[in-house]
């Protein structure tokens, strides 16, 4: 197994928390928006939903299969979302490949899972995620909730197992870096997930709270290592898992876990929750949102809810802290224009790389 000393180190050694130094490329002051990323109802925006989103002023949006029909429709929707808040807001989705992808055939490519893609090597992973990113950017989506840096184990729950790049920290770090590089080259911001590491858990956090009873020293050598190696990336997502060595709260709502992500792992970027609608968390949507912000998360991700629940979360999350706003601006500064590389040439290279390994 690769040891932590063998892993590629991240390039930004700072690990800012609120009140500490902000990322080096962040402005001294930054626009403050609602501390949320919100889902939307359907294929189009109605007048009521548009008015709600304008008042809520979320930092960004997340789209699911219910929001996707055709390229033209999706471009209209992403444009309307940005017009609705009057700025070039982030629009994200989950496009990992395998069974977790929101844009599918016939209009978009059905990509292999992370596990299957990793078998073809890092260059193939980078090319696939660059092509995937081109498809997203052409539809107006400029952020992808990928790559998964969770370390697969023999007992990893099936909901997560083939979404992992591998079982070895070095492999996961290399493949994760390749995926992130491909997305960034295409003009799409990556979101590393699920911090501080979901791979050992045997419970699906959509339904229950996974519990991780492992020493922090052991996690340093394994689960934390890929996140530490890619801690320079601009955005990350928490895991709804409880680390018994810290406290009795899921990491998303645990100040100790957020401090571990910032200080022990060294992640200095913009930190969002996983979807707070998942049953690993307790309380009302508003209580979940408030707990995440109090713990130190920068943004609350709320994907699928009634209008009343969305309003409850918006109110509980409040506005971004100044430190969160600076991290958000630093993330946006990493966003590139849409990729102008010829996708046919990229696909030809991908085919050649895969064939050479066959």
Image: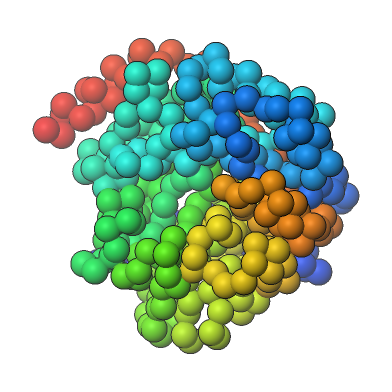
Name the spot of residue 167 as percent of width and height, x first. 27, 61
In terms of image quadrants, where is residue 203?
bottom left
| Vertical comparison of 354 with 31: above or below | above
Residue pictured at 69% horizontal, 69% vertical: 287
Colour setting: rainbow
Q: Nearer the viewer, residue 278 or 254?
A: 278
Position of 329 compared to 64: left or right? right
Name the spot of residue 33 as percent of width and height, x first. 81, 47
Q: Nearer the viewer, residue 284 or 228?
A: 284
Task: Indicate the quadrant containing the N terminus: top left, top right, bottom left or bottom right.
Answer: bottom left
Name the spot of residue 191 as percent of width and height, x first. 53, 48
Residue pictured at 68% horizontal, 54% vertical: 309
Position of 86 compared to 331: left or right? right
Residue pictured at 41% horizontal, 48% vertical: 176
In terms of image quadrants, where is residue 253?
bottom right
| Vertical comparison of 343 with 125: above or below | above
Residue pictured at 47% horizontal, 85% vertical: 244
In this rendering, the count of numbered labels is 0
Q: Nearer the viewer, residue 311 or 181?
A: 311
Q: Tell me, yes or no, if residue 231 can be seen here.
A: no
Q: Tell me, yes or no, if residue 311 can be seen here.
A: yes
Q: Nearer the viewer, residue 63 or 199?
A: 63
Name the spot of residue 178 as percent of width and height, x first. 40, 41
Task: Indicate the quadrant containing the C terminus: top left, top right, bottom left or bottom right.
Answer: top left
Position of 212 compared to 83: left or right? left
Position of 245 compared to 301: left or right? left
């Amino acid at each position: 197994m690769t040891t932590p000393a063998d892993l590629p180190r991240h390039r930004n050694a700072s690990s800012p928390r609120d009140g500490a130094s902000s990322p080096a490329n962040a402005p001294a002051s930054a626009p403050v928006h609602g501390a949320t990323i919100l889902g939307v109802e359907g294929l189009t925006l109605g007048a009521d939903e548009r008015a709600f989103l304008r008042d809520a002023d979320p930092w960004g949006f997340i789209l699911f299969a219910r929001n996707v029909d055709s390229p033209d429709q999706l471009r209209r929707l992403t444009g309307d979302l940005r017009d609705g808040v009057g700025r070039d807001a982030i629009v994200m989705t989950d496009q990992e490949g395998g069974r977790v992808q929101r844009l599918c055939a016939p209009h978009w490519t059905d990509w292999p899972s992370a596990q299957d893609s990793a078998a073809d090597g890092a260059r193939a992973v980078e090319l696939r995620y660059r092509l995937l990113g081109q498809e997203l950017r052409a539809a107006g989506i400029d952020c992808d909730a990928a790559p998964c840096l969770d370390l697969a184990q023999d007992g990893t729950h099936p909901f997560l197992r083939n979404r992992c790049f591998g079982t070895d920290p070095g492999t996961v770090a290399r493949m994760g870096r390749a995926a992130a590089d491909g997305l960034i080259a295409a003009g799409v911001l990556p979101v590393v997930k699920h911090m501080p590491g979901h791979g050992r858990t045997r419970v699906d956090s959509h339904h229950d709270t996974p519990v991780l009873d492992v020493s922090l020293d052991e996690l340093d050598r394994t689960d934390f290592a890929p996140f530490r190696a890619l801690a320079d990336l601009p955005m990350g997502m928490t895991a709804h898992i409880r680390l018994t060595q810290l406290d009795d709260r899921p990491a998303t709502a645990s100040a100790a876990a957020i401090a571990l992500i910032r200080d022990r792992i060294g992640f200095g970027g913009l930190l969002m929750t996983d979807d707070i609608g998942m049953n690993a968390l307790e309380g009302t949507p508003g209580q979940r949102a408030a707990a995440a912000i109090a713990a130190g998360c920068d943004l609350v991700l709320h994907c699928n809810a009634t209008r009343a629940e969305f309003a409850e979360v918006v109110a509980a999350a409040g506005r971004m802290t100044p430190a969160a706003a600076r991290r958000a601006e630093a993330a946006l500064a990493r966003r590139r224009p849409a990729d102008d590389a010829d996708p046919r040439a990229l696909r030809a290279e991908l085919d050649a790389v895969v064939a050479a390994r066959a």
